[in-house]
Image: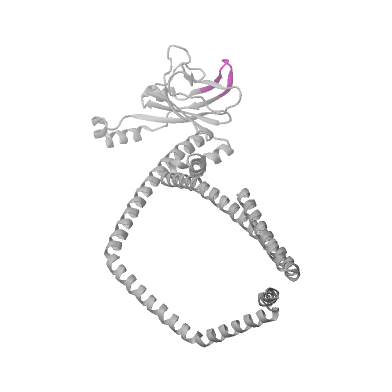
Amino acid sequence: MEEEEEEEYSFLIAKPPPWFTVLLSFQADLIHNCIFTLLAPVTTLFSILSESYQRAEEAKDSVKSAAKNVPSKVAHGSSLMVRKLAWGLLGAAYMGMVLVALMVVAVVVGVGLVQLWVEEPVFLRESLHFDYTEPHPKAVFSFGGSKGKIGVPLGHTFYVSLRLLMPESDFNRDAGLFQLTAEVMSIDGDVIAKSSHPCMLRFRSLPVQLTRTFLMGVPLLLGISSETQELTIEILKHKEGYSRTKAIRVTLIPRAGTLSLPQIYEAELLMNSQLPWKKKLVHSWKWTFYVWMSLYVYIMLLVVLMCCFRSVLFPATTASQRDHNERDLTMEVSKEPDSRARDTREASESLKRWQQSRNKRKADVLQKLQPETVGSSASSITITREDTSAFVEEDVGDSESVC
């Protein structure tokens, strides 16, 4: 009987009513909140004072360290500024050399291209020698006869003039008029164009001759002046076509009814070609085309250099970019073990959370089964505890197997 009473008393003490535990927890929370509320101003004040003291100490230490490091920082900053300035000047000089070389190349290429496009007018000055062994002395000027003689380009209109240096002799004055004939010869030997002009010495009367000789006596005796006349006659005009010109032939013909030919010191052929209006416009603005073509070529070369040869234009930037890429590669390689360790850590943490949730569910099931076992008998309580220990052991075995 005594054992049964002790078991009843133990059962009553082991299971207090639920409202009692709730009341105790409420009272404990109420007392804790009251004490915390009463002590809050004091704790806040002490925390503010401690923080201000710590900040003052930190400021004092930072001021001391800054005062100690000021000379070293100034020296380091000045050396760094001088180094940057030197590198900047060196980079500017290098860039200037590259751009100047690029400009020289662009000017040469631009001027060469414009020279290939623009045509120049032809100016020729050639001496002629008449063959007086023939009844009608002839002199031939050939474009391909010697070095330096070029043909007239297609479409040019050329003008041919003849300069004659003749003595003021009685024979020439008596000969009077004579005829000059000019012919344009093609490559096949045909006459493309022909023209003829009369010519004679300028008339001077006897008193004018005597007066001039009296006034110019000293220069004539010293050889400064001479008794000659220079005649320039425009004898030919021709537009170059597809029948290309090979030579120009000039003939001296005496006046009709006479056989006397004039005496000539020198004879010279003068040729001047005129461009077509389109080519003339281009030739007139060739310096403008030089500038613009050189500028276009310079821009094109600069774009090609920037796109294809950037390392030549910016060597320092390319080297820094290469170092930066290598640094990123090393950082990525170093981050791979960290990422693997983090993945392993996350897997272990998820496994632990799963085990904790599993244990919690088992504990909830045991708490639900505990009231029934306690109300029946004490033996059932012992069985329940044994079952609980069995569940716990089984759980531990499962967790170990999972690990």
The x and y percentages for residue 11 are 69, 74
In the visual, does 170 lie left or right of 329? left
Q: Main secondary structure of the magenta part?
A: strand
- Residue extent of the magenta highlight: 181-194
Asked whether residue 357 appears in the rendered view, the answer is: no
Residue 13 position by quadrant:
bottom right
In the visual, does 367 lie left or right of 118? right
Q: Nearer the viewer, residue 218 or 17?
A: 17
Identity of the residue drawn at 30% across and 62% down: 73
Asked whether residue 191 appears in the rendered view, the answer is: yes
Inspect the magenta stretch and tell me whether residue 357 lies in it. Answer: no
The x and y percentages for residue 110 are 49, 38
Q: Nearer the viewer, residue 256 or 120?
A: 120
Q: How many labels does the image show?
A: 0
Identity of the residue drawn at 54% across and 50% down: 339
The single residue placed furthest to the top in the displayed view is 133
